[in-house]
Image (cartoon, rainbow, N blue to C red):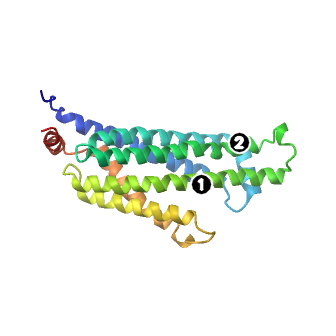
Amino acid sequence: MKPAPIPEASANLRARVAGVLYVLCIACGFFAELVVRAKLIVPADAAATAANILASPGLYRLGFFADVIAMALGVVSAVIMYTLFKAVSRTLALTVLMFDIISNTISICGAVLLFGPLMILPGDVYLAVFPAAELSSLALLSVKMYELTYAMNLAFFSVSCLLTGYLIFRSTFLPKIIGVLLALAGVCYLINSFVDFMPKGYGDSLFPWILMPSLVGESILALWLLLIGVDSSKWNEIAAARRG
């Protein structure tokens, strides 16, 4: 006996929920990076960075929580996206889900490094052997190590973007152009991660421009899912064909 067809509204509802989570994920990431770290972190000045964090520890902590929330939302959104794209290819959709979980897990684990300055800079008793200048350097080093873990996250996420772009292009329930833009986003993320692990100064002229296509591709997908959703009738046709 064949399973009953999924109600037409179901696919569109899941798409919109995924869109909400995707938009919130982007917003949390923007807040953490552009409102918090851009204000507090001075890349080449450990002393200034330490002074900024010590002056606004609550803001820095809020940025940390925003990052963790973004990663958690990313995982939940990825699961919902899997339920949509498995109608196109279960194997590829599952592969995308795997890469999404790996990439977010890397960042969640790496977030411990991001929290490091809040443990290092107050100079607790067990850190008394370190002069203040060394504590400042250790705090900035902790942030920079987190940035490398995030670059590793984006390397795995770039594969997710490429495969999702392909799934969108193959599907009939989302515009093909969004698939192209998301695949381009994946290429840009991969280039960015490659540059982050190259010698200092290598490819500096690419940043932040190399991330602009990624921002465009992800934002358009998130907003499309949120505001428009998917073509439920076409999604049901594909899902029914696979079941048949």
Q: Give the Cα distance between marks 2 and 1.
A: 16 Å
The residue at the point 32 percent across, 44 percent down is: 226
Instruction: Say whether residue 234 is left or right of residue 206.
Output: left
Q: Residue 25 lies in what quarter of the image?
A: top left
Kindly state the secondary structure of the residue where label 2 is placed: helix
Viewer-side residue, 40 vs 194? 194
Instruction: Say whether residue 148 is left or right of residue 4.
Output: right
Q: Position of residue 82 (x, y in %)?
A: 32, 42
Looking at the image, is 63 positioned above or below residue 152? above
Residue of label 1: 147
Quadrant in the picture for the C terminus: top left
Q: Which amino acid lies under the numbered mark 2 shown in the image of this protein?
A: Leu
Q: Residue 182 lies in what quarter of the image?
A: bottom left
* Disc assigned to residue 99: none
Viewer-side residue, 150 vs 92? 92
Instruction: Say whether residue 25 is left or right of residue 9.
Output: right
The residue at the point 40 percent across, 45 percent down is: 98
Q: Which amino acid lies under the numbered mark 1 shown in the image of this protein?
A: Glu
**Residues tagged 2 and 1 counted as in contact (Cβ below 8 A):** no
Disc 2 packing (10 Å; few <14; some 14–19; many ≥20): some
Viewer-side residue, 18 vs 152? 152
Instruction: Say whether residue 49 is left or right of residue 110.
Output: right
Q: Position of residue 28 (x, y in %)?
A: 50, 44
Residue of label 2: 118
The residue at the point 38 percent across, 44 percent down is: 97
Q: In the rendered picture of this protein, how many numbered marks are placed on residues?
A: 2
Q: Position of residue 213 (x, y in %)?
A: 40, 63
Looking at the image, is 47 positioned above or below residue 97? below
